[in-house]
Image (tube, grey):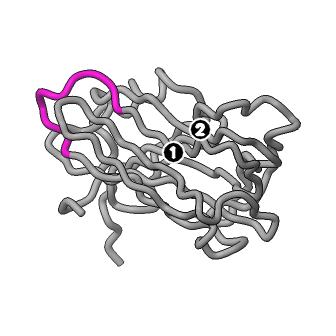
Amino acid sequence: MASAQVQLPHNLQAILKEEDSQIYACSERPKDSIVFHARKLIIYRGNDPTCWKWVHMPDTHGAPVEVAKLLGIDCLYVGKVFSAKSLTQEKHYRVYFVLMMTDEEKGFKDHPVNFQLVAPNQPTVEHQKDLSELPKNKWVDVPVGGFYRDPKMTGHLKISMFELGPQSKRGLIVNKLVIQSVDKPE
């Protein structure tokens, strides 16, 4: 039985040296993937135990991972700033959050969350999604957008999800942010 070749980012060692063990190259798929687990994301009031609870849960493939469970907050912001030079050139990428909505969900219905991807020298990608419509108690890939890693691209990617309404929100679990190469743009 032949095994598939997995192509990891050309500068994987530099990426891993720059980041800590919460970022890893995903080799389950034959694509370049950079994964930022919840602890590596910027989470507004993420260290406030009245707003977020850090727990271990099975990941999408069953391995335990630390995730952030929203207990209650009015202003929701989760994001990451990431160097474009860490990605393989001349590839298309898709960006998505892996999230779960629990039965305790409150404050999201009729208050869509904004998703934004800012890539250097490319139009900003923005859209909204009503997270109350996600299936309950199941990990879901929620797309942010896509971009092309041009060889001339310098600077940083800015990826975020936010909802700044005054209503209290709870019941969201943030697992990770994934930047994954794709064969064709979506």
> Residue at left 39%, top 49%?
33
What is the crowding at mark 2: few (fewer than 14 residues within 10 Å), some, or many (at least 20)? Answer: some
- Which residue matches tag 1? 161
Magenta segment = 148-157
The three-letter code of the residue at mark 2 reads Tyr
- Which residue matches tag 2? 77
Compare residues 139 and 113 and report the one nearer the observer.
113
With 4 as the anchor, is 66 left or right in this view? right
Tell me residue 94's x, y (percent). 33, 54
What is the crowding at mark 1: few (fewer than 14 residues within 10 Å), some, or many (at least 20)? Answer: many
Q: Quadrant of the N terminus?
A: bottom left
The three-letter code of the residue at mark 1 reads Met
| Disc 1 element | strand
Residue 39, placed above or below residue 173: above
Q: Is residue 3 magenta?
A: no
Residue 22, placed above or below residue 62: above
> Residue at left 75%, top 42%?
73
Disc 2 to disc 1: CB gap under 8 Å: yes
Compare residues 25 and 126 and report the one nearer the observer.
126
Disc 2 or 1, which lies upstream in sequence? 2
Residue 66 can be seen in this image = no
Compare residues 41 and 33 and report the one nearer the observer.
41
> Residue at left 71%, top 50%?
65
Q: Quadrant of the C terminus?
A: bottom left
With 59 as the anchor, is 54 left or right in this view? right
